[in-house]
């Protein structure tokens, strides 16, 4: 199995920035895709950003131009740089990884991001 551990969440004022990290460990073969999802109060979990092994990325319209996803393949770690944060970005952020060797999706336990003045 693959374990994912998120870090970097916290309280930030509107307009501020945070950087989330997701470190993968365990029985890793080939993490083809890593993604960040979020679930706000009373909302369904939604995709925020995703990045493939090739470096190609995809973003939700709501975060385009503000968030940047990246990954370090040598460390099996993904990052989410969040800039110009808004109150509506408040959510629990979850890391997701698809490992082709395991043929499975894995999830982290989430990290809380609160944007408030």
Image: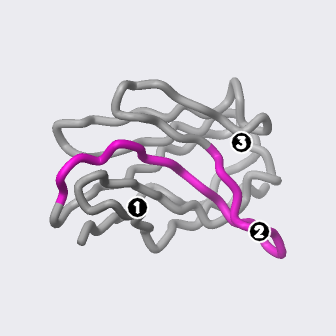
Disc 1/disc 3 C-alpha distance (Å): 19 Å
Marks 1 & 2, CB-CB < 8 Å contact:
no
Front disc: 3 or 2: 2
Q: Earlier in the sequence, mark 3 or mark 2?
A: 2
Residue displayed at 26% across by 66% down:
2
Residue displayed at 40% across by 61% down:
6
Residue displayed at 73% across by 59% down:
90
Marks 1 & 3, CB-CB < 8 Å contact:
no
64 left or right, relative to 81:
right
Way the structure is coloured: one colour
Q: Residues within 10 Å of mark 2 (few under 14, many from 20)?
A: few
In which quadrant of the rendered image does the N terminus lie? bottom left
- Quickly name the residue at label 1: 6
Query: Between 96 and 16, which is closer to the camera in this rendering?
Result: 96
99 left or right, relative to 13:
left
Residue at disc 3, secondary structure: loop
Query: Between 26 and 66, which is closer to the camera in this rendering?
Result: 26
Q: Residues within 10 Å of mark 1 (few under 14, many from 20)?
A: many
Q: Earlier in the sequence, mark 1 or mark 2?
A: 1
Q: Position of residue 19 (x, y in %)?
A: 48, 43
Q: Residues within 10 Å of mark 3 (few under 14, many from 20)?
A: many
- Quickly name the residue at label 2: 44
Disc 1/disc 2 C-alpha distance (Å): 19 Å
Residue 32, magenta (yes or no)? yes
Residue at disc 1, secondary structure: strand
Disc 3/disc 2 C-alpha distance (Å): 20 Å
- Quickly name the residue at label 3: 85
Q: Position of residue 73 (x, y in %)?
A: 24, 36
Residue 45, magenta (yes or no)? yes
Residue displayed at 42% across by 68% down:
108
Q: Which residues are magenta?
A: 28-48
């Amino acid at each position: 199995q693959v374990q994912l551990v998120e870090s970097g969440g916290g309280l930030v004022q509107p307009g501020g920035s945070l950087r989330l990290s997701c470190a993968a460990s365990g029985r890793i073969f080939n993490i083809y895709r890593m993604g960040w999802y979020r679930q706000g109060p009373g909302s369904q979990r939604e995709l925020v950003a995703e990045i493939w092994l090739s470096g190609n990325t995809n973003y939700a319209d709501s975060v385009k131009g503000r968030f940047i996803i990246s990954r370090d393949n040598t460390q099996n770690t993904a990052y989410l740089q969040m800039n110009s944060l808004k109150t509506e970005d408040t959510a629990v952020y979850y890391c997701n990884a698809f490992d082709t060797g395991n043929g499975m999706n894995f999830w982290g336990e989430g990290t809380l991001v609160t944007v408030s003045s």
